[in-house]
Amino acid sequence: MSAPIKVALAGFGGRMGQMIAGLVQTENQFTITAATEAPHSNLIGHDVSESLGIHKTGVEISSSADMLGKNSDVIIDFTCPEATMEHLRIAVETNTSMVIGTTGLNQAQEKQIEDAGRHIPIIYCANTSIGVTLLLQQVKKIASMLDESWDIEILETHHNQKVDAPSGTALALGAAAAEGRSVLLGDVRDSGRDGLTGARKKGDIGFSVIRGGDVAGEHSVIFFGKDERIELTHKANDRVIFARGALKAAQFIVGKLGQQGLNGYFTMDDVLG
């Protein structure tokens, strides 16, 4: 049996951090070797076992991001854009693979992640769910087969604590549709409609956002044609699907480090083969 994959978990106390940490305890092929939290967190200095209900591990939660690059095979990061950029720097400096699921990144930050792929194996995606990965593929394919007479609208719903909108997944779906049409999303994106907006512009990709309750995530892409429409929908019943996908991505990315020609910027499409 091969040695467990050593996971450094950024944002240990967050929703996704706790979900991933919980799954690691049930999967023999992983072990947590480092965990971090923001300096103000009351988890700092505590053993990771305390929130997981397991025997003491000896791994204490730290406020120092530098801990992520020590004795780890992969850094898994579902934090915030500013923290992710710091963790990315550490990953490159320590030659550590990285899986990033942080949303709300701007174009410059996304470019930094892509550039880091020249030095380390890295996976960045707005949604690590297997189902959403398949949805993205289908949206791109359908968009490539329909002309501009078909209007494209993206509807997303999330819990009331989500801070960014549209969601990273919604934007990824929009980008997939735009790629299918051989255009840039920035040139056709239409979001935040309010007041007298005028008629819908032909070729635009529209976004609508709903926030409420504890919804884990729902996304629909609707293609409106004359007298017909196509609707593709993914509903996340539990955030655990994102944690499962993140660990699947970690398995894929670990082992690529050091293999000639296999450093690179990967997506969940690569994970699914």
Image: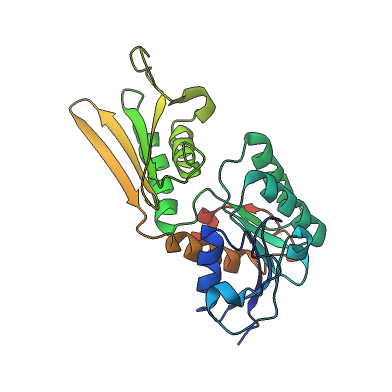
Residue 73 position, x and y percent, is: 70, 69
* Residue depicted at x 47% and y 41%: 167
231 w.r.t. 93: above or below? above
Number of dots carrying numbers: 0
Where is residue 250, by image quadrant?
bottom right
Q: Furthest-left residue in view?
A: 227
Image coordinates of residue 177 in percent, x first then y, are: 43, 36
Which quadrant of the figure contains the N terminus?
bottom right
Q: Is residue 273 in view from this perspective?
A: no
234 relative to 173, above or below: below
Q: Quadrant of residue 21?
A: bottom right
Residue 66 visible, this angle: yes
Q: Position of residue 244 (x, y in %)?
A: 48, 66
Q: Residue at x 62, y 47 (%)?
A: 80
Camera-side residue: 193 or 29? Answer: 193
Q: Nearer the viewer, residue 118 or 199?
A: 199
Q: Image quarter for residue 260?
A: bottom right
